[in-house]
Image (cartoon, rainbow, N blue to C red):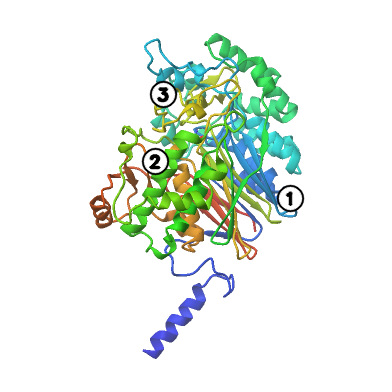
Amino acid sequence: MRLFCLCLLVVWAAVRPAVGADTPIITYEERFLPTVSRGGMVVSQEKLASEVGAEILRQGGNAVDAAVATGFALAVTLPQAGNLAGGGFMLVYLRDEDKTIAIDYREEAPSAAHPQIFINDDGSVDEKRGRYSHQAVAVPGTVLGFVHALNKYGTMTLEQVIAPSIRLAAEGITVTYALEASLASREAFLKRNPEAAKTFFKEDGSLYRKGEVFTQLDLANTLRQIALGGERVFYTGPLAQKIVAEMERNNGLISADDLAMYRVVEREPLVADFLGHRVITMPPPSSGGVHLFQMLNMLEELKIGGVPQNSAQYYHYLVEVMRQAYADRSKYLGDPDFVDVPVETLTSQETAKQLVALISESKARRSQDVAPTRLLPKESYDTTHFSVIDDAGNIVSNTYTLNFSYGSGIVVEGTGMLLNNQMDDFSAAPGVPNGYGLIGSEANQIEPGKRPLSSMTPVIVQLKDGSMLATGSPGGSTIITVVLQTVLNVLQHEMNISAATNAPRIHHQWLPDEVLVENGISPDTVELLEKMGHHVMYRGRTLGSTQSIRLSQGFFYGASDPRRPGAAVAGVD
Ligand code: GLY
């Protein structure tokens, strides 16, 4: 017996990671381990894009240089969500100043838009026009967002950070399983637009297969113009002219003035304490930050730390706080430049106390007591998140999107550039669900120049042990609950970032009144939840796809979510 123990000790010493006995991140108590590097890290949904960012770090660029390079690269290598003509949110943490900036480059409704624009004569909502026509396209923010971030917080030139993307588009990328599967799944949709068909399929209309080379010469040319001419090319120059001509030919809304007037907004990030950790996230027009904090506050009041993780009781409490948050989202959230969003009230501990008093320990509440149940459509592979930390400890946590997978499915003629369909993130009419089944009110109604409410929730956490975390996810309406569970797993359950990523997830969004659960949640637990009165649905697919980095004691620990193919951690050593 003694010998056996000694052998075990020898084996343990041999396989033990070389990060020192005081490193808390990697232990053999967890089944999933993160990727580790020493000199910086980029984590994104696509391997080539992560490598582009890591190479910029190797060249001496900071986290913002690497993030902007990664963002442009994703527009080439992850066409369903990476983009030039979408929008998003970027958190930039500057280590020297211990300061975080929240950059809002969300799209805006064109000046010709109005609250009734997608309402038919009979009062019904024209979903097709609101999601898939040229009128569904909101004024894009990505190019100005990236240029703004780079000019203000980066160290390299636009030409330097776009160069790898031009190369990828011009020389072509080797088609991965993930890209082939993505294009195959949206083939019919993309072929409705001749320019998209030309961009994403071979001349004979067939699919690019895994291992083949996929070039995007128009996109390479578009990127070259932006590299040389900056954002002016996109908002007032030749690309703007092409976008406006595309709109005029197809009854779209975006005018030359709309593009020329588009502005990036730097907002005060939302900052709150959770269990002594400092959580930093995006304010409205993201709903993510407000409701992340609201749910964390409620869970703190419910003393979630004392409830066994993954038990039915645990999920019951998660569902009830999610139900409350999404109910409030539907009523109060919108663009803060147009409506008063009661951020302080919604995120206060006092509100959390009052709301928690309404939650029973053992009985599910009914959402349909408040509003009729609606069906949630299948989540599309929309939106994408990437995280970057450089060796100085500067951080970028960025989520951006075309809205649905491949956005509107419309490519601007001669540019290789897909347009978003972000107008669907407005509430077309009070009480009518959008593409994610989300209900909105007047606070999120369409108005000229307004930004549609978003669920995108990029997060940075300063942990009380001095380590840092960057995370975020795609997933439409599920983004907020996916990020909540990832943050909880790290902060409350002290899981390493890989284990936190791999843990099974649930989702509830008030309406429809269903708990979506991933595989991995035990049928016994589901039965207990059903006995409490919850309507549980096995999802048939997964929830979210987080891209996260934890920086602790000089080591970078990365985790790309395994739920979607193609994602990758690229470390710098
Ligand atoms: N388009 C998804 C979101 O912004 O939440």
- Whether residue 135 is situated above or below residue 335 in the rendered picture: above
Q: Is residue 382 among the parts visible in the rendering?
A: no
Q: Earlier in the sequence, mark 2 or mark 3?
A: 3
SS at mark 3 in the image? helix
**Residue 139 picture quarter:** top right
Q: Which mark is residue 451?
A: none
Callout in the foreground (2, 1): 2
Name the residue type under label 3. Answer: Phe
Q: Position of residue 284 (x, y in %)?
A: 57, 37
Which is more toward the observer, 163 or 511?
511
Q: In the figure, is residue 539 to the left or right of 47?
A: left
Q: Residues within 10 Å of mark 1 (few under 14, many from 20)?
A: some
Q: Which of the pair 116/524 is nearer the observer?
A: 116
Q: Which residue is mark 2?
A: 509
Query: For residue 119, what is the image quadrant?
Result: top left
Which amino acid, mark 2? Gln
Is mark 1 in CB contact (under 8 Å) with mark 3? no
Q: Vertically, is 44 above or below 332?
A: below
Q: Quadrant of the C terminus?
A: bottom right
Mark 2 and mark 3: Cα distance apart in space: 27 Å
Report which residue position mark 1 lands on.
60
Q: Residue 152: image x %, image y %?
A: 75, 40
Q: Mark 2 falls on what kind of element? A: loop
- The reply to whether dot 2 and dot 3 touch (C-beta < 8 Å) is no
Instruction: Please say if 44 is above or below 521.
Output: above
Q: Position of residue 241 (x, y in %)?
A: 66, 15
Q: Looking at the image, which residue is at 73% across and 35% down?
A: 159
Name the residue beneath numbered marker 3: 189
Judged left or right of residue 179, residue 283 is right
First reached walking from the N terminus: tag 2 or tag 1: 1
